[in-house]
Amino acid sequence: MISCEELFSYFDKARINFFTGVPDSCFTPLVNYLLTHENDYQHIIATNEGEALAISTGYHLSTGNIPIIYLQNDGLLNMMNPLTSLADSYVYRIPALILISWRGHPKLKDAVQHKRIGEITTNLLDLLDIPHFIYDGNNEKLRRAITEGVSTAKKKDKLFAILFFRGDIKPYPYSRSVHAEMSRKEAINTILKNVDENTIFVATTGKISRELFEYREEMGEDHKTDFLNVGAMGYANAIALGISLNKKNKKIFVLDGDGAVLMHMGNLATIGHYKPENFYHIILNNLSYDSTGGQPTSANTVDFCKIARAVGYVYTHEIETKSQLISEMRHLNEIKGPALLVVRVKRGSEGNLRRPTIPLTELKKRFIKFVRE
């Protein structure tokens, strides 16, 4: 394990001053340190990992310096196109140091959505001809790896990766409040209590899916109306679009997050273009990547309602209170979509929030049976 102070002393000695990436629970201390020392480093939280690589490319092209990109190993797949068609040695040979959180390692217990990428992470790096170092708790080896990585990047115009596991970096405190009346759980429960029992729900990755699952468990319901998109961040609304266009007799509600929508915001244009009348999109907005420690998204400068209207949504509204939510749910039940409701909620969740305890394949069977009947 290494402290942020020691880790950043290595970066300082390597003359690294630029950081970009997408928050992950493994790198919560690192991101918290950067947010706390924002005057000492240039730091950009990207909406997706491919964007982070492109941003770091621009940084290198304009300065000649080596950037750091941080990401979860799942994010390697979001980076695949710019990795192979922009930064690769066959193309522009763009150097960078990539810090990767290794989720789903075959010898470690983790959520099922990380299993496949966990099995192939180092194979992918080898296929991409990206040399890498796996941190094993030896800080002197890590220091040398950072030095080697920067040297390789500079001399060979090459990417170099360092892999970490959750818990490798000591916690670093960062305090930030988001003012809202409702918790996310309270908002989800209110939404569920104000729809028809045959309404279909598609929930985004992270705590939104987990809180939807928890509600059904508490109410003794069988989850048949819900699709929990536990991985594939940013694609819940696209899944819901595919359902809505083929099941026009059912109402489809998407429970989305601000970070998830920002990751693949082009999906909104597709939804607005095809205009499914049974599509109701709810963004539970806490201005945060809540599942990875509450780091800020860029949603504080984004007007989701204006964007949705501009691309073809027929109704949009933003609310902050429970009474407004109840009123809007009644309204949504009476109008045609595509409609967007942005609900401001608090950061955080109850400490014992669990992942789905029913196998995902079983949940899929129940959902399919309900949707196709």
Image (spheres, grey):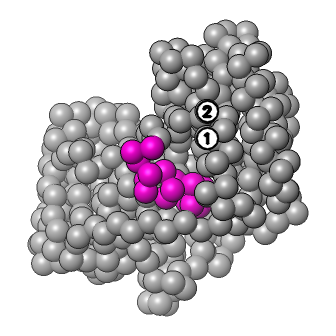
Residue at figure coordinates x 24%, y 44% from the top left: 302
Q: Is residue 62 left or right of residue 156?
A: left
| Amino acid carrying mark 2 in the image | Arg
**Type of the residue with mark 1:** Asp
Answer with the quarter of the image where residue 325 lies. Answer: bottom left
Is residue 199 a member of the stretch shown in magenta?
A: no
Tell me residue 123's x, y (percent): 85, 37
In the rendered image, residue 128, in percent from the top left (x then y), is placed at 78, 26
Considering depth in this image, is 267 or 100 the residue closer to the camera?
A: 100
Q: Is residue 283 above or below residue 151?
A: below
Mark 2 = which residue?
A: 15
User: Horizontally, is 230 left or right of 153 in the view?
Assistant: left
Residues packed near mark 2 inside 10 Å, few (<14), some (14 to 19) or many (20 plus)? some
- Are dots 2 and 1 in contact, CB under 8 Å? yes
Magenta-colored span: 24-40
For residue 315, above or below residue 215: above
Overall secondary structure of the magenta section: helix
Reading the image, the residue beneath label 1 is 12
Residue 101 drawn at (x, y percent): 69, 51
**What residue lies at 44% left-to-right and 66% top-to-bottom?**
174
Q: Quarter of the image holding residue 249?
A: bottom left
Secondary structure at badge 1 equals helix
Location of residue 153 with respect to 143 vertically, above or below:
above
Residue name at image x 44 percent, y 89 percent: 219
- Mark sitting on residue 112: none
Residue 5 x %, y %: 61, 57
